[in-house]
Amino acid sequence: MPDSPVPPDPPPYFRAHVFVCCNRRPDGHRRGSCAARGSEKLRDYMKVRAKELGLAGVRINQAGCLDRCEFGPALVIYPEGIWYRPETPADIDEILETHLRGGGRVRRLMLTETDVVPKG
């Protein structure tokens, strides 16, 4: 029986999808949490600025724990799977302009394969 062709995937609904960790752990938790480090305010700012900038096809979403708590606040942008650690609205502006508008990377804010969660 001949292989039947696999239909192509549908086009992406969004050109870029940003997930901002807004997980909150109890104060004093050994891993900390992105929300305790200000991720909720950064997410809110990012949503407003993306709209102001007219970034079509970009969706900014709140996420639960992305499991990089020690490096938070953390966000990840798909489809590329690029992780960032923004700390200020200016960092968010740079990510919006450089990555989401220009297609580049903000290297100084990126989390890389060397940023791993400590065991234990």
Image (cartoon, rainbow, N blue to C red):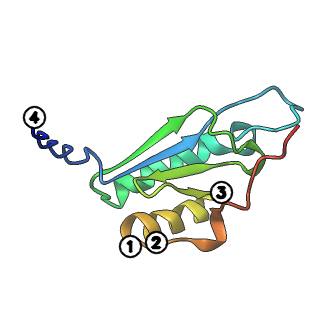
Of badges 1 and 4, the one in the foreground is: 4
Helix, strand or loop status at disc 4? loop
Left or right: residue 85 compared with residue 16: right
As measured in the structure, the alpha-carbon distance from the residue carrying label 2 to the one carrying label 1 is 5 Å
As measured in the structure, the alpha-carbon distance from the residue carrying label 4 to the one carrying label 3 is 51 Å
Point 21% across, 44% down: residue: 9
Helix, strand or loop status at disc 1? loop
Q: Contact, CB < 8 Å: mark 2 with mark 1?
A: yes
Q: Looking at the image, is 24 positioned above or below residue 75?
A: above
Helix, strand or loop status at disc 3? loop
Left or right: residue 60 compared with residue 66: left
- Residue identified by numbered label 2: 98
- Residue identified by numbered label 3: 85
Helix, strand or loop status at disc 2? helix
Quadrant in the picture for the N terminus: top left
Point 18% across, 43% down: residue: 10
Per the rendering, the mark at residue 74 is none
Per the rendering, the mark at residue 102 is 1
- Residue identified by numbered label 4: 1
The mark nearer the N terminus, 1 or 3, is: 3
The spot of residue 97 in percent (x, y) is 44, 69
Point 58% across, 56% down: residue: 83
Q: Contact, CB < 8 Å: mark 1 with mark 3?
A: no
As measured in the structure, the alpha-carbon distance from the residue carrying label 1 to the one carrying label 4 is 47 Å
Point 46% across, 63% down: residue: 96
